[in-house]
Image (cartoon, grey):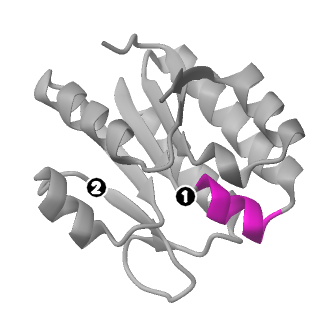
Amino acid sequence: SLTKGRAYLFEFASPDRMFESVVQEMGDGMSALIITRTHPDQLRTRYHLTQTPFIWLAQSPGPDRVDPANIQLLTHMTMEYVRKGPSLIALEGLEYLMLNNDLNKVLKFLSQLRDEVIVEGSILLVSIDPRTLTERQKAILERELEVIKE
């Protein structure tokens, strides 16, 4: 069970465990916003998330999509959602954000989001494959977020 006002790092090769937690929390009545590299239709079908808003990290323009290099827009959209009331924010695609941005910008985004989640009594879930990180990157993320490992 996850605690409101906390931020968690799911260190798994696959994001499945994080998405299972999203479904469980939503079953308990929490609203969620999912930021993902995976196409939202795949996740909607797999996890029955028909009413859940998504932000797809994609370079092609379209509705509910954000270019991964536009971290300012992603920050704005995410903060706006969190400020509406206690909610769950799930991020799958951190590696993709790190490829398209300076690491410090990505870490600043995560820190701002973590702080806002704490203040608003929300929950932040971040999924990452630990094999994609350097030791330094992993240490920084593990310091900012509560780790859930395989």
Q: Residue furthest bottom?
A: 60
Decide: few, some or many residues near mark 1? Use Cα within 10 Å; few <14, some 14-19, many ≥20.
many
Q: Secondary structure at mark 1?
A: loop
Above or below 13: residue 45: below
Mark 2 to mark 1: distance in Å? 16 Å
- At label 2, counting other C-alpha atoms closer than 10 Å, the crowd grade (few under 14, some 14-19, many 20 or more) is some
| Residue 111 screen position, x and y as percent | 72, 32
- Residue span colored magenta: 94-101
Q: Residue at x 53, y 39 (%)?
A: 126
In the image, is residue 61 part of the stretch drawn in magenta? no
Q: Quadrant of the N terminus?
A: top left
Give amino acid for label 2: Pro
Q: Does residue 32 sit above or below 117 in this rendering?
A: below
Q: Give the number of the disc on residue 93.
A: 1
Q: Position of residue 108 (x, y in %)?
A: 79, 41
Q: Please give left or right for residue 146 compared with residue 31 in the image.
A: right
The kind of secondary structure the magenta stretch mainly shows is: helix
Identify the residue under disc 2. 53
Residue 20 versus residue 5 in the image, above or below? below
Picture coordinates of residue 80, whole percent (x, y): 49, 44
- Residue 85 visible in the shown view: no
- The numbered mark, 2 or 1, whose residue comes first in the sequence reads 2
Residue 110's x, y, as percent? Answer: 68, 39
Q: Which quadrant of the view contains residue 18?
A: top left
